Every structure is written in C-alpha cells, then in structure tokens.
Amino acid sequence: MDLAGRQHSSRTPHRGALASAAKADTHRRYRCSYTPRDALGHLNPSDTGAAPFVQFRAANAEQATDLAQKVTGCPVIEATRIEG
C-alpha cells in the first residue's frame, strides 16, 4: 500500500525490456562505407579516398548492407563489423 492508500500489484520485470536486451545481444555493430551521390544523383566518390559511413546494429553484414543502402540511397562499398 502506498501513501495514497492504493494497493500495488506484484512487480515483475517487464517482458519487453528483457526481450529487447536479449535481441541487442544477438545483433552486432557494423560500419558501412558508401559512395555518395551529387545533387543530380550521379556517383561522386571522394577525392581523398575516404568514404563516408553509417553505423547500424544488425544480425549480419548482409542485413547491415541492406539497411545502409535503404537509408543512404547510395551504393555500399563494404560493411565492417565493429568489435566492442
């Protein structure tokens, strides 16, 4: 009973929080480098050779590559797994 006189139900861990924590453990972090496009939509590789990148949590490199392509709309060069 709390100070207002209400009864509390038994407190159990939230199942969604446990499921998302388990899911996060099965996914790895990936850094996906891509070739950007210019304003006209043509590929515009960097003059310095450094490619921009995005990072995702994914089950594998193929899923990370698919996500990067959908988000950036650009061809993905590679997906590198980040340890940590």
Image (cartoon, rainbow, N blue to C red):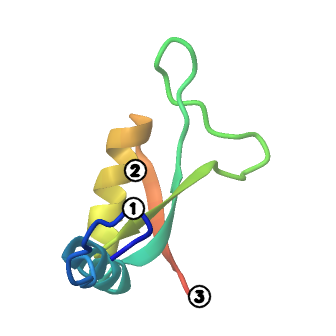
Quarter that holds the N terminus: bottom left
Q: Are marks 1 and 3 in contact (CB under 8 Å)?
A: no
Label placed on residue 84: 3
Q: Which residue in the structure is indicated by mark 1? A: 4
Residue at (36%, 78%) from the top-left corner? 24
User: Outermost residue, top direction?
Assistant: 40
Kindly identify which residue carries mark 2.
68
* Image position of 52 with respect to 21: above or below: above
Of callouts 2 and 1, the N-terminal one:
1
Instruction: Specify which label sits upstream in the sequence, 1 or 3.
Output: 1
Residues packed near mark 3 inside 10 Å, few (<14), some (14 to 19) or many (20 plus) = few
In the rendered image, the vertical position of residue 72 relative to residue 84, given as above or below? above
Which secondary structure lies at badge 3? loop
Q: CA distance from mark 3 to mark 2?
A: 20 Å
Find residue 75 and report its horizontal and vertical position in percent: 41, 43
The numbered dot on residue 20 is none
